[in-house]
Image (spheres, rainbow, N blue to C red):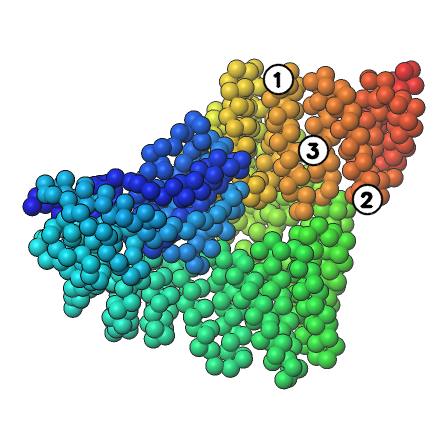
Amino acid sequence: MDRALSVAALLDPTRQVVPFHGREPELDALALWRDSPTAQASLLLHAPAGAGKTRLLRHFAEHWDEEEHGRLLVVDDADRLTWNDVFAQLQDTLRHGPVRTRVLLAARTTGWWWSSTRQRIADFDHEVTDLELAPTMGDRTGSFTLACQHFAKQLDVTAPDEPPPNIAHETVLDLHMAALTAVRGDPCDVNRTQLVRRLLQHDDGPRTGRLAEDHLAVATPERPDPDLLARAALRWPVLRPGLDELLTGTPEVVRDMARDSLRIAAEIGSPATVEAIARQVFRDERFATDAIPSILTRRLVERAGGTLERAEMYGMLSARTMLCGLRQESVDASRAEVRCYRELVERDRENRPLLADALGDLGLRLINAQRGDEVLAVSEEAIALWHEIALDDPETVPQLASALEQISYRYQALGRDEAAMTAISRATLLFQELATNHPALFRADFARVAAAMARRFHVEGRKQHAADSMQLSIANWRVLAQEDPRFEPELARNLVTAGTMFVDLGRAEAASETLKEAVDLFRRLAVANPGTFGTGLADALVRRSRALRELGDDVEAALTAREAVMLWRETGDRRGVGAALLTVAQVVGDVGAAEEAVEVYRDLVAEDLVRNQAGLVVALAVLVEQRLLRGQDGEALHTADECLDVCHRLPSQLVEFFGDELAPALQNTARRLSESDHHVRALRMSEFAVGVCRAITAKTPPTVYLSAVQQHVCRLRAAERKEEARNTAHTAVVLWHLTGLDLDRHPGYADALTIYGALCAETGFEVGKALRLTHCAVEILREAGEPVKLGFALETVEALSSS
């Protein structure tokens, strides 16, 4: 027989010797998934080996119309890939694909590897489902007859006329093996082992794919391939003792096994096998974000002796499941840990600190799983418990302070700003007292939490308090660095953070001085260790150039920015080079620097879309602005279209994560487009910027979103969409009243009243009411000392009075 027609070739699903047939229910289900209104969707098709997954995938893909249905990505044998492999293919759909995207995966198993992958894919705004494929056909007789006919044609023999045999736990491949056996003239009404033996008895062709696994099951070689053995053992239970013997006898083979076979061994192996794998995997960083360590830990929990050991194992399981994207599973493990510690506390109250720590961890897991409605109850129970413990044992006050700090972050994440401020204030006071009494132990904690307090003040718009708290933090870091030079890098990093905040607070001079101190310190550190501190110096230079620009020192700002570019080039960090080039473009007005930055980010996006796509948006926005300033309107509009296209492909997770970088760049570009009378694109960019600011409201002052809305009103006004602008301005005024801020002293609120009044004057709408509101704005601005805004308010009063 021709080698091309070996058993492996005849049964190979990719060769389609037996044409695809049947599977109407599954095809109908896939068609419904394909045509669902969801823009982005992923589906896992799963079934045992040999069920026909590859055939179904190929048939479905061959009949796909990209123009009608969008882009399709097929990932076969997904369970044999790492998350990074799947992620790399998924990134490609985000980079090039249309808005409508379908990702079809296939695998033999589900379990925790799929749960991890499913939750991670969902982060890209995909609706994720799965579909189980029946192992064999509904019409077995028709399928068997068709297979006999096509095998007979290939072998140039007469097709037999007989019914299909009964095969226990039959798959499509089993039925085809029986058909091929019958075509060759051998009895096919035998068990699966005999089928494999008879097919391979007179065939010396290559044994690949599934056939290699079945051959292994009947040949039982002395030294089988570990990966092949693990995959075969999933279908052939008789092989499992051999798998256990191999992995326990020669555990070093674990290091070279594929992840999917390791996962199978972890699931079906004996306790001794699980321990042998665990000893290798737990120490291997390659598996840090894989589900395998979690699967192993889950198996080991089953063998834990006492309650304390079980609690510790559940804690380990909770941490490992969270690392690999098993968010819901991490919550379940953490709850089990808490239950164990509650049981221990009932036996001995000395175990209360262990329970309090476990409750704190559970709060983190709940936040990670986006179950915010449950977080506060758990966190508040932990705080109450630490209070109780601290009353009995003052030595535990540091733990109480740390718990208060952590719950403040959780309140903030859930939009509970007042509660967040109360918690961080209490934590700061406790750490301040601890630092006063034991400076060597707690000064660093106080410095850290004082900076957190400053950020909280900043979110609430209390600029003076934010500046004072940040200065207090820096003062303590300075003392630490003077007493112990090992704290100098931490001081330098915190100086950069402080200087950046001072820029945001409108204190350019303080920002410049603080960042100069950071630059000088990083310079000294970089002389001794350029590899470690060169990037810190380059980053500090970039930030100082921005502060100098705010001060109006354009010459020094330009020199500083260009030095930063040079240093980033030396470090080889292209993201740093891109950011520094954008600073040069903005400080100097260098279109060439902006163009180079765009090319840098294009290259970075080609390598890692998720980390760099937001950077590309910012670079394109800056390039639009610089081209408009140079009168290159045609090129600017082309770039603006590309920028908006990338914006609308950003998954919501990236918008939330990088929003504080995206919003300012998009708002500046929208303003420049509006000033250049390119109103359509200005409004599209402004609308997206408003959406970004809405997405990041939990981590920014409420004024950030309100400012974005008011800027959008200005874009609408410039586009002569006066009524829409007025209605949006009225919405902004209402939103100001929902912030809980002291509006009688807030210039931002006064500005919103003035804008609304101006639009009422221009449209002749409720002029009397608008005049009263604008008079209120004038009073606020007079007291706040805002001459420019006050002038606009007085002009608006005059316009309304004459209406």
Q: Residues within 10 Å of mark 1 (few under 14, many from 20)?
A: some
Which amino acid is tagged 3? Ala
The alpha-carbon separation of the residues under discs 3 and 2 comes to 18 Å
Discs 2, 1 touching: Cβ within 8 Å: no
Q: Is residue 554 visible?
A: no
**Residue closest to the far bottom:** 347
**x%, y% of residue 366?**
60, 59
Which mark sits nearer the N-terminus, 3 or 1?
1
- Establish if 465 lies above or below 103: below
Query: Residue 30 or 609: which is nearer the viewer?
Result: 30
Per the image, the residue denoted by label 3 is 708
Q: Residue beneath label 1, please? A: 678
**Helix, strand or loop at mark 3:** helix
The amino acid type found where label 2 is placed reads Leu
Mark pair 3, 1: CA separation? 19 Å
Residue neighbourhood size for the residue with mark 2, other residues' Cα within 10 Å, grouped as few (<14), some (14–19), many (≥20): some
Locate residue 635, reporting x and y percent.
51, 18
User: Would you call the spot at circle 3 few (<14 residues within 10 Å), some (14-19), or many (20 or more)?
Assistant: many
Asked if residue 682 is positioned above or below residue 263 in the image, the reply reads above
Vertical comparison of 17 with 796: above or below: below
Whole-angstrom CA distance, mark 2 to mark 1, is 36 Å
Residue 226 showing in the rendered view: yes
Image spot of residue 768 (x, y percent): 92, 24
Q: Which residue is mark 2?
A: 741
Q: Amino acid at mark 1?
A: His
The residue drawn where x is 77% and y is 53% is 418
Classify the position of the C terminus by image quarter: top right
Taking depth in this image into account, of 349 and 79 the one nearest to the observer is 79
Residue drawn at the location 74% of the way across and 23% of the way down: 724
Q: Secondary structure at mark 2?
A: loop
Kindly check if marks 3 and 2 are in contact, taking CB atoms under 8 A apart as contact: no
